[in-house]
Image: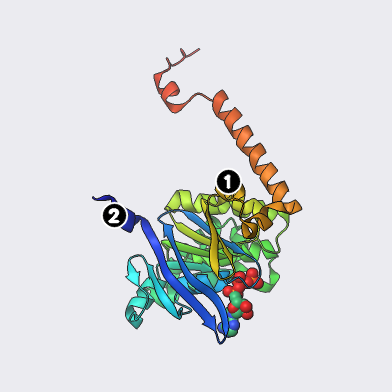
Amino acid sequence: MSNAAASQTDTVIEMAGVSTSFGDHVVHRDISLGVRRAEIFALIGGSGSGKSTLLREMILLQQPNAGTVSVCGVALQGISDADALALRLRCGVMFQHGGLFGSLTVLENIGLPLREHTELDDGLIKELAAWKLQLAGLKPEVGAQYPTELSGGMLKRASLARALALDPELLFLDEPTAGLDPVSAAGVDELVLKLRELFGLTIVMITHDLDLLWQVADRVAVLADGSVAGIGSMKELAAMQLPAVRQFFDGPRGRQAQQQAKQQEKQQAKRQTKQPTQEQQAGSTPSKPK
Ligand SMILES: Nc1ncnc2c1ncn2[C@@H]1O[C@H](COP(=O)(O)OP(=O)(O)OP(=O)(O)O)[C@@H](O)[C@H]1O
């Protein structure tokens, strides 16, 4: 495969020259970016910088005024209803406020996409919903509860379980740790990494959570003044001298998250030097049974 062809298939979401306005209010000016297969890609920016609007444009909830968006190789402009539905079924979305139906139990909420979009019988739907509940880190008994009975962290996990119901290829997370205590938020870091590792999901998330960004994001796009002010790994962004980017790193939370990330990197490096590598293990003589 040529390099050009390889890079095309590796880019799952492609936005080119995207401009968006609401009346006179210009939100995006000529934004271009690509999200690669199986990467964890984050959108950050100040309040009102257009993160949610950009995400909505990726999941067919909004049309830009100009430019092109393609997802999994499908151009979204002028897409037919049938193709739009097919594409939506390949995308799991976890909305910021959960979006679960209050009149349904957690298990019924998780099973809803399966009930709507598959011919599976009730028993199988229940089983699959229970598996997604477990995958999202919730105990089986939570399935019988109603959304109003759940803590903020549990609600996010239940919403994530529903987003995973149809085994999506792409997962969109809108502020997955907003409103969570640090322990619950740290659990989300691990969960996001696990999902990518287990299923090779491509994950796009909006977050203000610097810990989450340092721990899980492969690349981050910083939106400011209608454009992408910077794009790269957190390390690369931290080294940039762009004012819009620096704002995220120079506050007390930014410094703390950076220090924490550096410490974890050091600890990991130490652990790696102590542990024998797989090659070393494979090559070592097995100890004699005692
Ligand atoms: N449907 C709409 N009609 C009019 N204006 C809108 C609409 N949707 C978004 N906007 C405006 O577009 C701008 C960008 O909104 P958006 O929600 O994308 O920002 P954001 O970066 O996600 O903000 P936040 O971090 O506060 O959620 C805001 O000024 C918002 O008021």
165 sits to left or right of 100: left
Q: How is the image coloured?
A: rainbow
68 sits to left or right of 190: left
> Where residue 73 sits in the image (x, y, percent)?
33, 66
**Residue visible at 51% across and 65% down in the picture:** 172
Residue denoted by label 1: 235
Quarter of the image for residue 151 reads bottom right
Q: CA distance from mark 1 to mark 2?
A: 27 Å
**Residue visible at 59% across and 50% down in the picture:** 240
Determine whether the residue tagged by mark 2 lies in a helix, strand or loop. helix
User: Where in the image, quadrant-wise, is ligand 1 located?
Assistant: bottom right
> Where residue 9 sits in the image (x, y, percent)?
32, 57
Disc nearer the start of the sequence (1/2): 2
Crowd around label 1: few <14 · some 14–19 · many ≥20 (10 Å): some
Q: Residue furthest left?
A: 1
Vertical placement of 74 versus 136: above or below? below
Residue 97: tell me if it is visible.
Answer: no
